[in-house]
Image (spheres, helix red, strand yellow):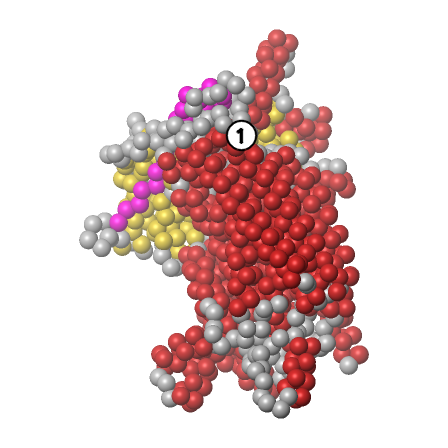
Amino acid sequence: MKNGSFRYIAGISVILIAFALLVMGSMRSNTLRAMPVDQLVGADGQSMVGQRLRIAGFVGSAPVTKTDVQTPQGTHEIKHFNVVYHGKTVAVTFQDALPDMFKAGLPVQVEGVYTAPGKMKADQVLTKCPSKYQAEEAQNALKQERKSKLLKKASSTTKY
Amino acid sequence: MIPLIGNQILYVAFAMSLFTIVVTFSAQWKGIRAGDVGVLSPNALRWLDVARNAAIAMFVLVTMASVLLEYLFLTNNFAVQAVWDHSAIAQPLFYKAVAFWGGMSGSMLLWAQILAIYIFVMTLWGKRLAKRPGFQDWTRIIPASVAILCVVEGFFLAVIILNANPFTVMVPPIPTDGIGLNPLLQNYWMQIHPPTLYTGYVGCSIPFALAMGALLFRRMDRQWVELSSRWSLFVWVVLFTGIVMGGVWAYETLGWGGYWAWDPVENASLIPWIALTGLVHSMILQQRRNILKSWNVVLASLVFLLSIFGTYLTRSGVVVSVHSFARSNIGSYFLGFLAVVILLIFALVSWRRSDLRSEQSVDTGLCRESLMLAGTWLLVLAAFVVLFGTIYPVIHEAMFGTQITVTKPFYNTVMAPLGLVILFLAGITPLLDWRSMDKKKALRAVGGPVLGALVASPFLYFLSARHTGAATSFVLCVMLVLGIGQLFAKGIVARHKMTGENTVTAFFNLLTLNRRSYGAYIIHLGLASLFIGLTGSSVFKIELDPVLLKPGQLLQVGEYTLKYTGLEVPEHLSPEKDGEIGARLLVAENGVPLKNRDGSPFSMLPYVDFYKPNAEATQTMPNQGEQVAKRPAIYKTLSNDLYLALVDFDKTKNTVTIKAYLNPLVSWVWIAVGIFISGTIISMWPSSRRVSKPPKPLRAYQQIVDNSQTETSEVTNPAQDS
C-alpha cells in the first residue's frame, strides 16, 4: 500500500509540475506591458518603440478622423484618434469597429504596437462599463489636455 | 429629509446586526464552550429568540432603506448624489428604478439587501427545523450561522455608511436634473443581471456560515452536510445564471461579437463559482461516507473568501479592468475584513480540529469516490489558476515595478486542458460504482460510452477541421451524453423489471423517486451542452474586418451571403432616443435566400441608437456629446449565430460599414443554463422519504434505551440513507 501511494503521489506531482510549467510559460508569452500614456510619452517610452503594449488614458477631445484603405476584401476604414493622460498624447490608428462608449473624455485602453514616439497602431480598443464610470476623472483628464495644449501653443517648437 | 432618514436607518440596521451577533453568541456561549447544543438553558433559548427578532428587525430596516432609496430615484430627488449620477427626469420609469444599482453605493446597498433577505430566510428556516424529525437541535445551532452572516452584513453596512453611502447629498446648489443612466445600461439585462449575480455571489456566504455554526457546536456530521448541500446547489445554479446573464448582455448589446473576455471582474465572479462546483461534489462525498470533513470546511470558507475577494477586486480598482471602478480606498476595508475572517477561521478550525478528523478515508482506486475527489481538486486548481491570472498584474508590479496586463490567450491555453480533463471525469465518474470496482467490471461499465465516443471520433475530428483540442472536446461530450443515456436506460430497465412500468413512466419515476442522482445526471448533460457551445464559439469563430457596403453589394460570412439593400429609419422613435438608423440586409444560406414563415424574404437589421446627453450632463461633461450605441442583429440557430454590427454609415451615399461574425454553436451555452436549472430543481426538490441518521452518540443512546425498556419505545428516526 505504501508503494502504491508513492506511485500516486509521484504521478500526481509530475502532472502538477507539467501543468505549472504550462501556466508559467503561458503567462510569460501572454502578458502585455501596460502603461498610462504620460509614462509612455515621457522618458520611459523610448525603449518601447516597436513593442506591443496596452496604454491607458482618456479619449482626446479632437474628433475622430477616418481614412479609407483598399484591400482585396473590400474597402476598410482606418480611424485616427488621440489618447490623453496628464497632458501627454498618443495618436492611435485603428482599423476595427470602435466600441460604444467611445467618446471624448471617457476612459479607454488601447492594445497594439507602439510604432513611433507618440504613435500607436492599435488592434484592440476597450472602454469601461458605464456603471463603473466616474464622471469626475474624465473631466480632470480633459482639463489637463486643454491646459497642456495651451502651454504647448505658448512655448512649443516641437511637432508631434 | 428622506436621505437623512435613510442614513439613520442604515445606522440603526448596523446597530441591530451588532446586537444580533452579541446576543446570539452570549446566549450560545455555554453551548459553544461545551460543544453541545443541549447545554443551553431555557433562558439562553429565550435570548436566542430575542436575537432572532433582532435579525428580522435588521432585515426590515435594510429593506426600508432600499425602499427609501428607490423612492428617491422614482421621485427624481437629485439632491441625492446617487440619483443625480444615474437618473434623469426624462429617463423611463423602469430605468429610474433599476438605476438603484447603477453605481458603487447603490450596488453596495443591493449586496446588503440581498444578504439581509438571506438572513431573514435563514432565520425562518432555522425555526422550522424544530419541526423536522431528527433536526430539532439545529434550531439552536442555526442562530450561530445567522449571527455569522450578520457579521458580514455588519461589515457591508459599515462600509456603506463610511465610504459608499447612497444617501450622500450633493453640495448645494441642488441640481434640477440628473445626468441620466448611460444608454448602454438601458436594457432589460440591467434589470436582471446584477440582482441575479449578487444573489449568487452573496449566497457564497451561506455554506461558510453553516460550516462555522456547525463547527462551533461540534456538529460537523451528515446532518450538517444534508442541510448545507441544498443551499450550496441553489447558490451554484443562481451564480452561474447570473454570470451567463452578464455574458449574454455583452453578446446581445455591446456588439463585439463575444460573451466572455477573461476580464478581471468577470473572473472575480467565476472563481468562487468554480470552487463552489468543487464544494457541491465534495459535500456529496461527505454525505455518503462522512469523509472529507476538514476539506469541506476549508472549501466552504474558500468559496466565501473568494467571493469577498472578488468584490474587493471589482470595487477597489486595484486590477485594471473595463468593469472595475476607479482606484479608491474602499479596497482597504475589504482587505482588513478578509484578514480578520481568515484569522477567525484558522482559530475555529484549530480549536475544533478533533471533530474534523474523518473515521474513514477515501477509497483509492478506480471508483466514483476517488474520481469525484480528483474532480474536486481539479476544480479548485482551475479556480486558483484563474485567480492567479487575475491578480498576476498586481504581483508583477509588486515584484518588478512595471505594470503588465494578462491577455486572453493565457486563460484559453491553460483552462482548455483542465476543462477537458474535468469533462472527461464528469463523463466517466457517474458510470462507476461508489466503492472500489475490479478492472473488468469498471471496463464493462464505461465500455459502451467510450466505444461510442471512439467510433464517433474520426467523424468529429474531420468536422472540427482537424483541430485536436476541439475534436477532443466534442468526443468527450459524446461520451458524456452516451454515459448519461446509459444510466437512464439502466434505470428504466431496472424499474421495468421491478414494477413492469413502461418506459415513459419509469423515466419519470426515476426523476421523482431518485431525485438526487438523476437530477445530477441531467446537470452533467448541461455540462456537455456548455462545452459544445464554448468549443464551437471559441475555436471556430469567424470574425471579419469591418467592410464598406454599397446598396446591392454582397458580403460572404461562412455559408451565409448577405445583400445590403439600404439604410432604414424607424417610423416611430422611442422618446428617450435622439435617433435610430439601421442597415437592412437580406440573408441567403448556401446561396438559397432565407424566408420568414409567411414567405417574405428574411432580413437582418443591425442598427445604431443615438442618445443626446441632457442639459445637466452637457453642463457637467461638456465634451461628451452624443452617445452612440450599436445594436447588433443576431440570427440564431442551433448550429451557429450570424452576428452583424453596424459600425458606420453615410446617409448621403447610402453606404454602411458592417462588421460580421459567425459564432458556431454558441446557443448551446445558453441552453446549458436551462439544463443546469432544470437539473438543479429536480435534484433539490424535497423528497418526503429522506430522513438522515442522527449523529452517533444519540443513536447509541437510543439503542441502550430501546434495549433496556420492556415495551417498544418510539424510535426517533427510521434510518435511511440516500
Task: Kindly identify the residue that appears in the image at 62 percent across and 42 percent down.
Answer: B15
Task: Kindly identify the residue that appears in the image at 63 percent across and 15 percent down.
Answer: A158
Residue B315 in sight here: no
Q: How many marks?
A: 1
Mark 1: amino acid = Leu
Who is closer to the viewer here, B643 or B220?
A: B220
Question: In the picture provided, is B452 more to the left or to the right than A48?
Answer: left
Task: Kindly identify the residue that appears in the image at 38 percent across and 88 percent down.
Answer: B500
Where is the C terminus of chain B found, in terms of image quarters? bottom right
Task: Kindly identify the residue that appears in the image at 68 percent across and 63 percent down.
Answer: B40
Residue extending furthest toward the front:
B43
Let me know if residue B610 is in the magenta part: yes
Query: Residue B625's spot in the image, x, y percent?
Result: 44, 24
Magenta segment boundaries in residue numbering: B602-623
Residue extending furthest toward the right:
A2
Let me know if residue B562 is in the magenta part: no
Residue picked out by circle 1: B4
Query: Residue B493's spot in the image, x, y percent?
Result: 43, 85
Query: Residue B411's spot in the image, x, y percent?
Result: 60, 52
